[in-house]
Image: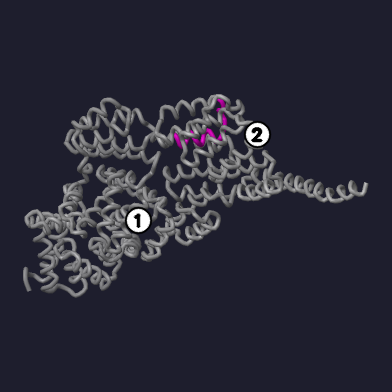
């Protein structure tokens, strides 16, 4: 009897601990489920982790923990919890959809498909399994099979918010921007608390209207889940586009506190450091991305720029070359690659890289000068002199289709075989335009546009074809249709140019102001806006824009300094205008633009003199048919009553 009593006495604490453990597990589990229901995934994960610790054999707690981990994007952790729940007796068919998602998060698409397409998937989760199959097929680029899987998903769950969010992403991947917007709207309507749907809708708004319009969407997502890392990341990226560096830095710090290995947060901080001129810090922050962004165009651009700034021109050229391979019509990348090749001493490569830019009638002075120096280094002085002369001209030619589009004969087969495919038809249309076959290009681009009303690129290429034919009003309309889907910088600038060519300056200004209202950091748009203000005599507005640009890009752009000098002169700040014009002339003395500006500012500041007349005569000699340059010279001649002093 004593032994039995002793055993009972010893055993009682164990029974009490077990009971308390299950009670603690249930309480933690309930708190976790409640937090998960409110969208507070991180709190849910902590509570569910406590539940699992209190009762390691509770399969339901492990499955709920897996759900929290999946919501946080932790596929590896979720896989471990699902596997443990299966070991504890959970029926495998009940977890196929969850395991497929966990494997998909790890990039194991084949394994994910095996789980999602298993014959024993529980009917209650069949739609979710098809959703995972569609995502896996999409990740593999098997779009036809993805379409079939997503179709089955919608038949099984036509009003599911998560399903419509994935449909939106899929449509965007196919280039169907309008269809993606419709699907994202439906996802948000189906579940206004679906943070993932709200984030994606915000990203579409950012593309469609601009970063300022997207801010409320990301704030809405964060109001539902203040610690949601994807929402914080997109919010920070949008703040960066708006130039709100301090707010962006605060948000990225919060991201890193929640997710110490978040490479996008470190990248955004690196970009901000580079903009501030702290290149060593930028390099250190880029290293903290762990190479996870090396294949992204923005990271290639930044990495190449950092190598260039450090004098590692060969490494810079390698990065820019990779970027250009990915984006062959990225003119900025081509320009940077040519500059890096020139500085690395590979003059032949620099000439070859810059040729599509220098051949354009509207080639910018920097590209022409750089190409000229490369030819000069190769001993081809005649070609170099011609390019230097073009770089010094005050007026650029009309915009042309990007050179280097290829031979239309070689691209025709794919375009004929897939007449509704933007990937096949757009390169063919651009090649036709480069070859001067404008009518055929318009016909092909028009057919593509009609077949792809929701694809902005189809409208843009149609606008390009119309512009090449001089049908600017129709081109502006086509660009407007593209802008309604995705109001990008390239589309906005094309639209402004088309309206100006069509003589509708008011419409051009409206578009420009609308774009700048959403994208205040756009250098080309600000330059164009400043030009419009100069032409209208709005000196203060022009000076404001140009001064802001000068602070951003420095004092090395002679034409920007010349424009700023004219704006300051218009404001009555003659001495400041003279100093700016002098510096611009020192940078580019062979230009009629800088010669005229410096000569005119000398005249306005100190009256007619031999120096001012020499400068104005030089400007006219360099560009004898320019009416403004002749007007300035003749006014000074009239002032002194002679052609010489």
Taking 139 as reference, is 263 above or below it? below
Asked if residue 169 is among those painted magenta in the image, a careful observer would answer yes
Query: In what quadrant of the picture does the C terminus appear?
Result: bottom left
Q: Main SS of the magenta segment?
A: helix
Which range is magenta?
A: 156-170
User: Residue 483 in the image: x percent, y percent?
Assistant: 37, 41
- Corner quadrant of residue 77: top right
Which residue: 27% across, 52% down?
318
Looking at this view, name the residue that lies furthest to the right.
1
Residue located beneath label 1 in the image = 302
- Mark 2 → mark 1, Cα distance in angstroms: 49 Å
Asked if residue 582 is among those painted magenta in the image, a careful observer would answer no
Indicate left or right for 88 with 17 as reference.
Answer: left
Indicate left or right for 52 with 259 as reference.
Answer: right
Taking 510 as reference, is 148 above or below it? above
Secondary structure of the residue carrying numbered label 2: loop
User: Residue 261 in the image: x percent, y percent?
Assistant: 49, 54
Secondary structure of the residue carrying numbered label 1: helix
Front residue of 613/589: it is 589
Q: Residues within 10 Å of mark 1 (few under 14, many from 20)?
A: many
């Amino acid at each position: 009897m004593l032994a039995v009593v002793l055993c009972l006495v010893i055993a009682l604490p164990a029974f009490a601990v077990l009971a308390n453990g299950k009670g603690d597990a249930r309480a933690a589990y309930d708190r976790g489920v409640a937090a998960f229901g409110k969208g507070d995934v991180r709190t849910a994960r902590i509570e569910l982790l406590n539940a699992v610790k209190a009762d390691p054999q509770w399969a339901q707690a492990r499955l709920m923990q897996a759900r929290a981990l999946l919501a946080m994007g932790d596929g590896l952790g979720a896989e471990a919890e699902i596997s443990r729940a299966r070991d504890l007796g959970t029926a495998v068919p009940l977890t196929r959809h969850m395991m497929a998602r966990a494997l998909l998060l790890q990039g194991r698409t084949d394994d994910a498909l095996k789980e999602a397409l298993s014959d024993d998937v529980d009917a209650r989760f069949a739609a979710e399994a098809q959703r995972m199959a569609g995502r896996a097929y999409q990740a593999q680029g098997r779009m036809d099979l993805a379409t079939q899987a997503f179709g089955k998903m919608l038949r099984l769950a036509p009003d599911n918010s998560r399903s419509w969010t994935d449909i939106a992403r899929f449509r965007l991947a196919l280039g169907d921007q309008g269809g993606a917007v419709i699907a994202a709207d439906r996802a948000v309507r189906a579940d206004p608390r679906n943070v993932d749907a709200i984030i994606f809708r915000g990203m579409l708004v950012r593309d469609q209207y601009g970063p300022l319009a997207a801010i409320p969407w990301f704030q809405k997502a964060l109001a539902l889940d203040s610690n949601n890392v994807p929402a914080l990341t997109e919010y920070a990226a949008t703040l960066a586009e708006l130039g709100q560096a301090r707010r962006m830095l605060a948000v990225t710090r919060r991201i890193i506190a929640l997710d110490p290995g978040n490479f996008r947060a470190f990248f955004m901080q690196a970009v901000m450091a580079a903009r501030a001129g702290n290149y060593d810090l930028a390099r250190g922050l880029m290293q903290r991305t762990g190479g996870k962004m090396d294949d992204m165009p923005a990271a290639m651009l930044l990495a190449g720029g950092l190598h260039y700034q450090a004098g590692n021109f060969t490494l810079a050229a390698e990065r820019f070359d990779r970027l250009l391979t990915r984006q062959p019509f990225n003119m900025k990348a081509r320009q940077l690659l040519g500059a890096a090749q020139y500085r690395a001493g590979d003059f032949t490569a620099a000439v070859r890289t810059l040729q599509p830019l220098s051949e354009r009638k509207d080639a910018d002075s920097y590209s022409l000068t750089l190409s000229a120096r490369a030819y000069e280094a190769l001993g081809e002085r005649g070609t170099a002199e011609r390019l230097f002369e073009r770089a010094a001209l005050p007026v650029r030619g009309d915009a042309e289709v990007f050179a280097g589009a290829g031979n239309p004969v070689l691209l025709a087969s794919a375009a004929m075989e897939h007449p509704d495919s933007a990937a096949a038809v757009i390169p063919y249309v651009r090649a036709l335009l480069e070859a001067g076959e404008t009518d055929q290009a318009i016909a092909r681009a028009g057919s593509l546009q009609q077949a792809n009303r929701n694809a902005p690129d189809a409208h843009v290429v149609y606008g390009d074809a119309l512009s090449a034919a001089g049908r600017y009003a129709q081109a502006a309309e086509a660009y407007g249709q593209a802008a309604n889907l995705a109001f990008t910088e390239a589309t906005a600038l094309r639209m402004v140019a088309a309206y100006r060519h069509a003589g509708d300056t008011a419409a051009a200004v409206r578009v420009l102001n609308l774009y700048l209202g959403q994208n205040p950091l756009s250098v080309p748009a600000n330059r164009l806006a400043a030009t419009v203000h100069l032409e209208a005599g709005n000196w203060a507005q022009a000076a404001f824009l140009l001064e802001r640009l000068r602070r951003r890009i420095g004092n090395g752009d002679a034409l920007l300094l010349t424009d700023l000098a004219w704006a300051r002169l218009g404001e009555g700040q003659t001495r400041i205008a003279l100093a700016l014009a002098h510096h611009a002339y020192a940078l580019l003395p062979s230009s009629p633009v800088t010669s005229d500006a410096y000569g005119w500012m000398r005249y306005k500041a100190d009256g007619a003199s031999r120096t001012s007349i020499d400068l104005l005569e030089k400007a006219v000699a360099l560009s004898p048919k320019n009416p403004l340059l002749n007007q300035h010279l003749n006014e000074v001649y009239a002032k002194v009553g002679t052609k010489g002093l």
